[in-house]
Amino acid sequence: AQKVTQAQTEISVVEKEDVTLDCVYETRDTTYYLFWYKQPPSGELVFLIRRNSFDEQNEISGRYSWNFQKSTSSFNFTITASQVVDSAVYFCALGGGSGGGADGLTFGKGTHLIIQP
Amino acid sequence: ETGVTQSPTHLIKTRGQQVTLRCSSQSGHNTVSWYQQALGQGPQFIFQYYREEENGRGNFPPRFSGLQFPNYSSELNVNALELDDSALYLCASSLGRAVGYNEQFFGPGTRLTVL
């Protein structure tokens, strides 16, 4: 069975601080995909990134960066110089598996990020 | 390009009733997935439809059923509503049958309250 753990329920920082959201996953599959989604108060999930299990290169997109480490089964997300607009719930998710990708995504419980002005 | 839309926005039902939620996919997408998100939790996969056939299902009982139409829009039906069915129901569309591999585009959700 697949599992995603986001141990940080809520994080509160002051604007312009850097913040890292942790994600640890469990799977027995060799081929899988990892995702991060952002859920603002409006409710719809916004796609941020997808990573496959064979690509461990870190990725940077503007103020966002992701660190994928298979050795520790982690896929952490860092926001540099945080802004109030970054306030949201962030979900890490795992996809793939023996169903050939037809098993949907397994989500963590989410981290509520609060950026204070 | 029109995004994923869902209707209604909010719904209140009583225990034992039946409900139908609707979703319009993003243009060009042939796969629709449904997720249930309880308050304070992450979304849980209910099922997915690819080209009008259910081809993946999560750990939900048969009273959760669905349809996908030729235009790739979709319905989620829940029979014999229970109090625990109160949640935000999210629809997501994508291209290709392997939703676990692909970027999904989510709608704003339908908030269902069961009294």
Image (spheres, coloured by chain):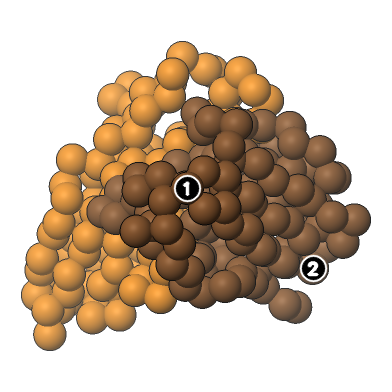
Chain colours: A orange, B brown
Q: Quadrant of the N terminus of chain B?
A: bottom right
Q: Position of residue B26 (x, y in %)?
A: 73, 66
Camera-side residue: B98 or B66?
A: B66
Q: Quadrant of the C terminus of chain B?
A: bottom left
Q: Is residue A58 visible?
A: no
Identity of the amino acid at label 2? Ser
- B13 sits left or right of B70 in the view: left
Residue under the image location 57 percent in, 47 percent down: B78
Question: Which numbered marker is on residue B27?
Answer: 2
Q: Residue A81 at x, y = what percent?
A: 22, 73
Q: Residues within 10 Å of mark 1 (few under 14, many from 20)?
A: some
Task: Tell me where residue A97 sits by quadrant.
Answer: top right
Mark 2 / mark 1, whichever is N-terminal? 1
Q: Is residue B89 left or right of residue A76?
A: right
Identify whether A48 is placed above or below B55.
Answer: below
> Image check: A24 left or right of B107?
left
Chain of the residue under the numbered disc 1 shown in the image: B
> What residue sits 23% from the left and 81% below the top?
A84
Check the image and report above or below for B54 versus B103. Answer: above
Question: Residue tagged by mark 1?
Answer: B16
Label 2 resides on the chain identified as B
